[in-house]
Image (spheres, rainbow, N blue to C red):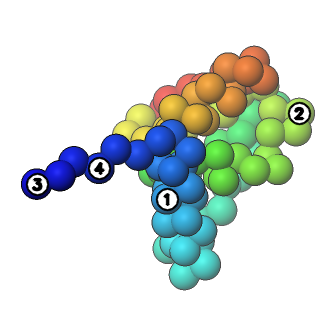
Amino acid sequence: MRQVTLTDEQLEWIVSEVVRRLRASGAVPAPTASTAGTLTLPERLVTLETLKGKLGGVGRVEVGCRAIVTPAVVDELKEKKIELVRG
């Protein structure tokens, strides 16, 4: 059996597409801003698409303790100096 290797960009696109389709079907709730500067995400899978347009004025992103956060998201948050907190 041949092993397929995906780039970070390909993996991010696949994950984003899955999330987009789940949101369109209503299976994934929208994120909520709970307090000023904190973005609380109820998703179990957090991608760059999840964060698109939501990081303005945010200094902290909270996700569930079992949430899967893609490496691209971790890098983006570090670059923007935004704290990632698992709850």
**Which dot marks residue 4?**
4
The extreme left residue here reads 1
Write down the residue under mark 3: 1
Q: Amino acid at mark 1?
A: Ile
Q: Amino acid at mark 2?
A: Gly
Check disc 1 and report its element: helix, strand or loop.
helix
Label 3 crowd bin: few (<14), some (14–19), many (20+), radius 10 Å? few
Q: Residue 67: percent from the left, percent from the top? A: 44, 42
**Which dot marks residue 14?**
1
On screen, 77 above or below 1?
above
Label 4 crowd bin: few (<14), some (14–19), many (20+), radius 10 Å? few
Q: Residue at x 62, y 26 (%)?
A: 75
Q: Is residue 25 left or right of residue 2?
A: right
Q: Are marks 4 and 3 in contact (CB under 8 Å)?
A: no
Which callout, 3 or 1, points at the residue further toward the start of the chain? 3
Residue 72: quarter of image: top right
Depth-wise, is mark 2 or mark 4 nearer the camera? Answer: 4
3D distance between C-alphas at marks 4 and 3: 10 Å
The reply to whether residue 67 is in sight is: no
Q: Amino acid at mark 3?
A: Met
Judging depth in this view, the residue of 29 and 17 nearest the camera is 17
Check disc 3 and report its element: helix, strand or loop.
loop
Q: Residue 66: percent from the left, percent from the top? A: 38, 40
Check disc 4 and report its element: helix, strand or loop.
loop
Label 1 crowd bin: few (<14), some (14–19), many (20+), radius 10 Å? few
3D distance between C-alphas at marks 3 and 1: 22 Å
3D distance between C-alphas at marks 1 and 2: 28 Å
